[in-house]
Amino acid sequence: MTTKQADIVIIGAGAAGATLAVLLGQVGFDVALVDPHPPESFKKTETTGRTVALIGSSVQILKATGIWDKLEPLSCPLQTMKIMDVSKGGSEPVAVEFDAQDINHDEFGFNIPNAPLRAALFERVKALKNIKFIEGRFHDYKTDGHSTKVRLDTGDVIQARLLVGADGKNSAVRHFAGIGTRRHDYDQTAITCIINHSRSHQNISTEFHTPAGPTAIVPMPGNQSSIVWVETHEKAEALLHLKKQEFEQALQRQIHDVLGGITLEKGPEGWPLETTKAKDIIAPRLALVAEAAHALPPITAQGLNLSLRDVATLAEILTDKARLGIDIGTQPVLAAYKKRRHLDIDTRVAGVDILNRFVANDIAPIIGARRAGLKTLESVYPLKMLAMRVGLSPRIDESRLARGEAL
Ligand SMILES: Cc1cc2nc3c(=O)[nH]c(=O)nc-3n(C[C@H](O)[C@H](O)[C@H](O)COP(=O)(O)OP(=O)(O)OC[C@H]3O[C@@H](n4cnc5c(N)ncnc54)[C@H](O)[C@@H]3O)c2cc1C
């Protein structure tokens, strides 16, 4: 058994944990980054080639890690977003279209493939001498007035001033800290896959709202798109067991032939959906970030965007306090993190939860209200502009990194 020393130990090297490690490593903190899966195994676990749609402020945060030059050629700008209500209760589909140019932006953000994102972050982790990647699984931790001692299943112990739980929605760190969660299971599975198509997507991201949930087509470079198709667990299970050609035909119907002929490139794969929100995001010498603090269904693509805002804010607070010579694991530092993050987290989690229930609903008055809402948004120009700006630049707790400034 060895005891390693670090300023900060981060449990979980997903996109959020690895981004935080790089941001902190770059400003000189000694960081221990722990994950049971070594970076080389990512390609195997990312079988469907899932992508994440990230808004401009999230892209700014990624740019601060120095990986954007590698990612930009693999990513697709999201210039137009289209929402179509195609519930059976209505006769004609109702559509609303948001164009980034209407608010003087080139794009709303980018659709970025997950596996290259994590690989690029790992190259940065390896390049920074003061970040140690440790292969292992969190077991427990003990805290005293000066530090925290984290024990891994390998027997290794890491002593640090602060522990960060970035270990995903079933966070073992959160569980060990005794922080409870509020959960809601929607009886929904997201089916994800990558398709090739004959027609150009013209950088338009389209989200169909159906009574089972949303189905999103998110453009990728060339004539490829990623699909997130939400269905009940039962229907999703049946779809996932179809033969390749049968699945392609079902998907073709689901997306109303908008992309011409389609063929499967990768996937499909199923992701059970739920909302999880931790009852607290701090404890003595502990901060939770990303899905360890909040996990959301994919409607309106908020998940990693919200997580990167946790990461950018925590990095900013820790850097500022350390520059003043303050112990970064102490209560006032953690309280500052909680104070800055709680409103953004609470409003996004509640908003996505309400929207998901509203969309995945086949009660006639709700279908009517949903369609009327979209019609209003489409026809009332200032409302549409407001919706776009709020979606694009969440002003609650904007960090320096999200504004494109240095730490
Ligand atoms: C279908 C779908 C589509 C999505 N689309 C979007 C989108 O378009 N835009 C968007 O912003 N978000 C999207 N999201 C959300 C986004 O994918 C997630 O927020 C993000 O991948 C989660 O990152 P994370 O780092 O918090 O967690 P994870 O990726 O789950 O990483 C957690 C890490 O912790 C490690 N770990 C777990 N337990 C332990 C332990 N005991 N000890 C050590 N390490 C441990 C794991 O190995 C893993 O590497 C989508 C999600 C889904 C399901």
Image (tube, helix red, strand yellow):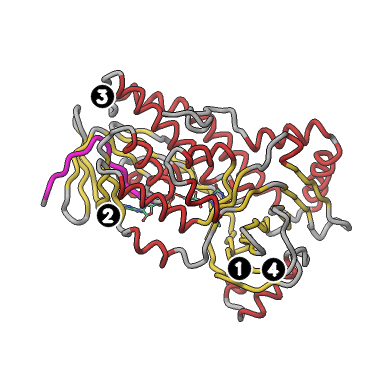
Mark 4 element type: strand
Q: Nearest the camera: 120 or 82?
A: 120
Residue 172, position in %: x, y? 33, 49
Looking at this rendering, what residue extends furthest in the top direction? 324
Which circle's residue, 3 or 2, is located before the other in the chain? Answer: 2
Q: Tell me the kind of residue under disc 1.
A: Ala
- Please give the residue where the numbered disc 3 appears in the rendered image: 327
Residue 133 seen by the camera: yes
Which circle's residue, 4 or 1, is located before the other in the chain? Answer: 4
Contact, mark 4 vs mark 1 (Cβ under 8 Å):
no
**Which contiguous range is marked in magenta?**
2-13
Q: Is residue 321 left or right of residue 381?
A: left
Q: How would you rate the neighbour count of disc 2 (Cα within 10 Å): few for under 14, some for 14-19, many for 20 or more?
A: many
Q: How would you rate the neighbour count of disc 1 (Cα within 10 Å): few for under 14, some for 14-19, many for 20 or more?
A: many
Residue 165, position in %: x, y? 35, 43
- Identity of the residue drawn at 28% across and 29% down: 329
Contact, mark 4 vs mark 2 (Cβ under 8 Å):
no
**Mark 2 Cβ inside 8 Å of ligand 1:** yes
Which circle's residue, 2 or 1, is located before the other in the chain? Answer: 2
> From mark 4 to mark 1, how far is it between C-alphas?
22 Å
**11 falls in the magenta region:** yes
- Please give the residue where the numbered disc 4 appears in the rendered image: 197
Q: Nearer the viewer, mark 4 or mark 2?
A: 4
Q: Tell me the kind of residue under disc 4.
A: His
> From mark 1 to mark 3, how far is it between C-alphas?
49 Å
- Please give the residue where the numbered disc 2 appears in the rendered image: 137
Q: Tell me the kind of residue under disc 3.
A: Asp
Contact, mark 2 vs mark 1 (Cβ under 8 Å):
no
Q: Nearer the viewer, mark 4 or mark 1?
A: 4
> From mark 2 to mark 1, how far is it between C-alphas?
31 Å
- Please give the residue where the numbered disc 1 appears in the rendered image: 236
